[in-house]
Amino acid sequence: MLDHLNQDKGLDLRAHEKLIIQAAALLHDIGHGPFSHVFENEIVPRLVQYEWNHEQQGLKMIDYLIDEQ
């Protein structure tokens, strides 16, 4: 897909830029629980007593993975 966009739109993406875009695509919703938004809207409020959303949870997961390396 990146090669297609690169060629058709003349983006002239470098290799490291493609890698960043691929990582973002893989990680963009990593914080979702099972059943996606149903989990976030129906199950999480019954389990936790603080503001929770998948975006913040995803950031915490990524930070943890980086810190543990």
Image (tube, rainbow, N blue to C red):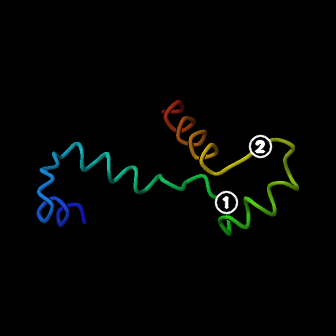
Q: Residue at the location (82% across, 41% down)?
A: 50
Classify residue 57 by image quadrant: top right
As measured in the structure, the alpha-carbon distance from the residue carrying label 1 to the one carrying label 2 is 15 Å
Point out the tag, 1 or 2, that comes first from the N-terminus.
Answer: 1
Q: Position of residue 35 (x, y in %)?
A: 68, 69
Q: Position of residue 32 (x, y in %)?
A: 62, 58
Given residues 17 and 41, the one toward you in this image is: 41
Q: Which residue is mark 1?
A: 33
Q: Residue at the location (18% across, 46% down)?
A: 15
How many numbered markers are drawn? Answer: 2
Q: Position of residue 53 (x, y in %)?
A: 68, 49
Name the side, left or right, on which 5 lies relative to 36: left
Q: Quick one: SS at disc 1?
A: loop
How would you rate the neighbour count of disc 2 (Cα within 10 Å): few for under 14, some for 14-19, many for 20 or more? few
Q: Which mark is residue 51?
A: 2
Q: Residue at the location (84% across, 54% down)?
A: 45
Looking at the picture, does residue 27 appear above or below residue 2?
A: above
Residue flagged by tag 2: what amino acid is it? Glu
Residue reaching furthest to the front: 9
Q: Quick one: SS at disc 2?
A: loop
How would you rate the neighbour count of disc 1 (Cα within 10 Å): few for under 14, some for 14-19, many for 20 or more? some
Residue flagged by tag 1: what amino acid is it? Gly
Name the side, left or right, on which 48 lies relative to 33: right
Looking at the rendering, in which quadrant would you find the N terminus?
bottom left
